[in-house]
């Protein structure tokens, strides 16, 4: 499917779209995905909610400053403040659309017996941020909506200073259903475990918990050997500390 002009790559089907026809189309495809999850007995469906419309991605520039070792410089702080200010200006309408979409998806998924994992996004412009996650889980308490923790995305947000260390997991542990596992080097994510510098020891309780789904999500440049080595590294870490 062709990406609509102004859409981010991760939002081909945009549940927060201001255009109602586009939003309804995204909901339609989400329902089809839920049907597929039922057919294959999937443990959960992971969802990207969307992003404030008309907002350019400023995280790329902020990550470039980080790579240039300019974190905490005036230029870096101003760039972050500009992102947060623009997001705050534009977030309300798209988040409201996202809630409308989630209301339909929650009802459909609950009837189907499918759990929906709302994913931590990479870029802080995107929905949901921590306060929005909290609002969603309160609004749809007892429903089919859960928290899906992307280890690499949360790590990048922490390194850029958008969230506190371990903020997402500490806030939403009671809703945690699954993990996207990949490593981060600097602010480059989706590397096989062992190719970055994440401290996996802090994640041991979640790796050991068999009720939490675990999915490797690495980019295609990672070789089969690197992925298998990463899997073994994490298994050995869990076994040594069990």
Image (cartoon, rainbow, N blue to C red):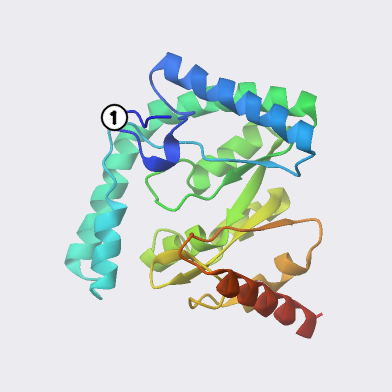
Q: Is residue 170 visible?
A: yes
Q: Position of residue 56 (x, y in %)?
A: 26, 41
Task: Please say whether residue 142 is visible from this viewpoint.
Answer: no
Note whether 85 is above or below 25 in the view shown: below
Residue, far bottom: 240
Q: Is residue 101 left or right of residue 74?
A: right
**Quarter of the figure with residue 31:** top right
**SS at mark 1 in the image:** loop
User: Measured from the top left, where is residue 163 in percent x and y?
Assistant: 45, 59
Q: Label 1, on which residue?
A: 5
Of the pair 196 and 219, the residue shown nearer to us: 219
Instruction: Tell me the quadrant of the picture where the C terminus can be found.
Output: bottom right
The spot of residue 20 in percent (x, y) is 43, 15
The 10 Å Cα crowd at callout 1, few under 14, some 14 to 19, many 20 or more, is few
Relative side of 218 to 177, left or right: left
Q: Is residue 18 above or below residue 78?
A: above
Q: Residue at x 36, y 35 (%)?
A: 52
């Amino acid at each position: 499917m062709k990406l609509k002009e102004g859409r981010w790559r991760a939002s081909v089907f945009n549940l927060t779209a201001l255009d109602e026809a586009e939003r309804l189309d995204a909901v339609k495809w989400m329902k089809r995905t839920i049907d597929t999850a039922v057919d294959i007995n999937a443990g959960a469906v992971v969802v990207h909610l969307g992003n404030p419309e008309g907002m350019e991605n400023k995280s790329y520039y902020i990550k470039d400053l980080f790579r240039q070792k300019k974190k905490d410089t005036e230029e870096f702080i101003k760039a972050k403040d500009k992102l947060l200010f623009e997001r705050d200006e534009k977030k309300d309408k798209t988040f409201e659309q996202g809630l409308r979409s989630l209301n339909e998806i929650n009802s459909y998924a609950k009837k189907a017996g499918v759990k929906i994992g709302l994913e931590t996004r990479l870029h802080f412009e995107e929905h949901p941020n921590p306060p929005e996650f909290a609002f969603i889980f309160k609004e749809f308490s007892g429903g089919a909506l859960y928290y899906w923790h992307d280890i690499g995305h949360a790590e990048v947000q922490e390194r850029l200073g958008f969230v506190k260390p371990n903020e997402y997991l500490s806030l939403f542990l009671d809703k945690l259903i699954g993990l996207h596992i990949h490593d981060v080097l600097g602010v480059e994510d989706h590397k096989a475990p062992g190719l970055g510098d994440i401290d996996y020891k802090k994640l041991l309780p979640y790796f050991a918990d068999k009720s939490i789904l675990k999915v490797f999500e690495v980019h295609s440049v990672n070789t089969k050997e690197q992925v298998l080595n990463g899997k073994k590294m994490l298994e050995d870490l869990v076994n040594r500390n069990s």
